[in-house]
Structure formats: structure tokens, C-alpha cells
Amino acid sequence: MLKTHKKTLSLVILMLCINKTALAQQLQNPALLNAVNSQSNEQSPLIKGVIPTLVSDDFLFLEGPTWSSQDNAFYFSEMNFASLQALGPDSTIYKLQLPNTITTYLKHSGTNGLYAKSGNLYNLNHNTQSLSKINIKSKTNTVIVNKFDGLSFSSPNDMTMHRNGDIYFTDPNWQLGERTQQIPYTGVYKLSNMGVLSLIDATLEKPNGVALSPDQHTLYIGDFSNRVSKYTIDENGDISPREDFIKVTSPDGIKVDSAGNIYVSSHSKGVINIYTPEGAFIDKIELGPNVTNLAFGGKNRKTLLITTAKGLFTLDVKVAGLAN
């Protein structure tokens, strides 16, 4: 009986070791771990077993992706931090036609964030320190606004647009370059559809990604304090004070899908975390360090274009993103 007991005990120990080894291998494989997370979470908008596809890694620092329904293409910015930095990094806008046809759209654009709407590429421009718009056909860039209370913005970064035409944008100072910062804070602004510019929040540390909920009543903003805040927008367009919403390490670009799920790029962690409208974590997309931003596009807006400090990726998902 004693020998039988020892054999049984040895078998149990062996099985525990095998399970421990398998778990360790799984944790070392982010794509596998992500697939397992998706399979065990019915709320996830990710497709089981589908991982990001590298389109190209022949780039410098990428940012600001957007989908243009006018010409069925993505646009994104590339910033060259090895260039002269007097006015921030030199930028180029590229155009991607799925699955992998990339062309140069506009050199020396000075752009970071982009937002395609009604035949225009709205752009957050560190060169001119402005919110501007480029006519997609003519490539003419027009400054919309570049000052608040007579002072120049620092380096506008990202924007979103309400369905009523109001624009919400962030102005950190990441690409200030050699210029002196005139506004003594890094702010979030609203440009109304009537052309009225107002300050939403002057308390955030380098505000970055910005997005709206499907019903357009909640505004999400990430900042360098490792958090995503939310603001309520009422029927008159008035905005409530900031509320703490989600803790995220170095949040960058933010997007929302049609179910209200919130995708937040964690720049230093190299992941895109996905949360429910209530702020509960449901899944993540793992890519590696320096994930910057993302945009929904393609057929039925179910393809994500993801930008990083070097690589450009696509990922098909189950839930469509919000249209611009």
C-alpha cells in the first residue's frame, strides 16, 4: 500500500509540474494569452484567435490614424524626431488602401492627430500650433484656430467631433520644439459649430487622446497622470466637471466602438486595453512598447489600424467602430 501511495504522489507532482510549465509558456506568448483571454470573455469585441497583422515596419514614429469614407482609405502621420526640432518634428501624411497599399500623401505636413470628415483632413498641427483642415483633393491646409485668449497653443495633439459639429481637442506640449510655451497650462478645448472657442479643462497634465461615447453625451480624455477622465455633455452642449474614470499607464490614443467599448492605447506598456462603458476591463490587444493610436475603418468599420513608434498594424474585430 505504501508503494502505491508513493507512485500516486509522484504522478500528482509530475502533473503539477507539467501544468506549471504550460502556464509559464502561455504567459511568455502575448498573442496566445490574448487569444485565451478572448475565448474566456464573451463580452470581448475581439475575434477569437485573431492577432494583429503587421502592414509595415519601415517607418519612424507613427500617430494620428483616421478613416476617410470619401476615398475608402486610412490616413496617418509619421513624425521624424531626428529632424530639426525648432517647430517640432517634421511630419509626413501617408495613405493606406487596404490591405497594404501605402502611398505618400503630403510631406512636411506638421501633423500629429488626423480626423477625416466631409472631404477634409482635420489635423492637429504642431508646426503651426493649430487646429487646421486639409482639403483631401487639393491638399490645401487652412488654419481654423491657433490661439486662445491671444496666446498661441503649444502643440495640439488629438481631436474628436460631435455629431452636431462641435470639435473637442487636446493641447499638450509634447511637440513644442524650441518655442516658448505661451499658455501656462496644457488644456482641453471645445470649438463649437458656431466657431466659439472655449476652455474645458486646464488641470490635466499633457492631455492626449480624446473620444466620444456613441450617444455623444460622454467625453473621454487621457492624460499623463495615468488616467482617463470623463465629462458629461448635456443636451445644450454644456460640459460637467471632470470625473476620474479609468486608471491606465501612459494613455495615448482613445477610440470607442458602436457598443460603447473604450479602446485605450497604453503607450509604455505596449497594449490597447478595452473597457466597457462602465469602465470594467474586458480584454487587451498586445503589440509591444510605444503603441500610439488606433482608428476604425475598412468594410463596415470593423478593421482597426494601429500605429506604434515604428510599425503599422491592422486587426479585424467583431464590433464596428463609430463613424467620423
Image (cartoon, helix red, strand yellow):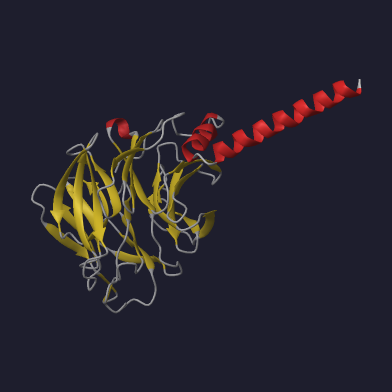
Residue 321 x %, y %: 36, 38
Residue 272 position (above or below residue 222): above
Q: Is residue 194 visible?
A: no
Asked whether the viewer can see residue 267, the reply is yes
Name the residue rendered at 39%, 74% in the picture.
Answer: 185
Q: Nearer the viewer, residue 89 or 30?
A: 30
| Left-right relation of 180 to 135 | right
Quadrant into which the C terminus falls: top left
Residue drawn at (44%, 36%) of the image? 259
Residue at 15%, 48% (x, y): give it: 104
Image coordinates for residue 204, horizontal then vertical, percent: 45, 66
Residue 72: x and y in percent read 20, 36
Quick one: 307 or 257, which is closer to the camera? Answer: 307
Q: Is residue 212 left or right of residue 196?
A: right
The residue at 47%/59% (across/down) is 240
Residue nearest the viewer, comparing 197 with 12: 12
Quadrant into which the N terminus falls: top right
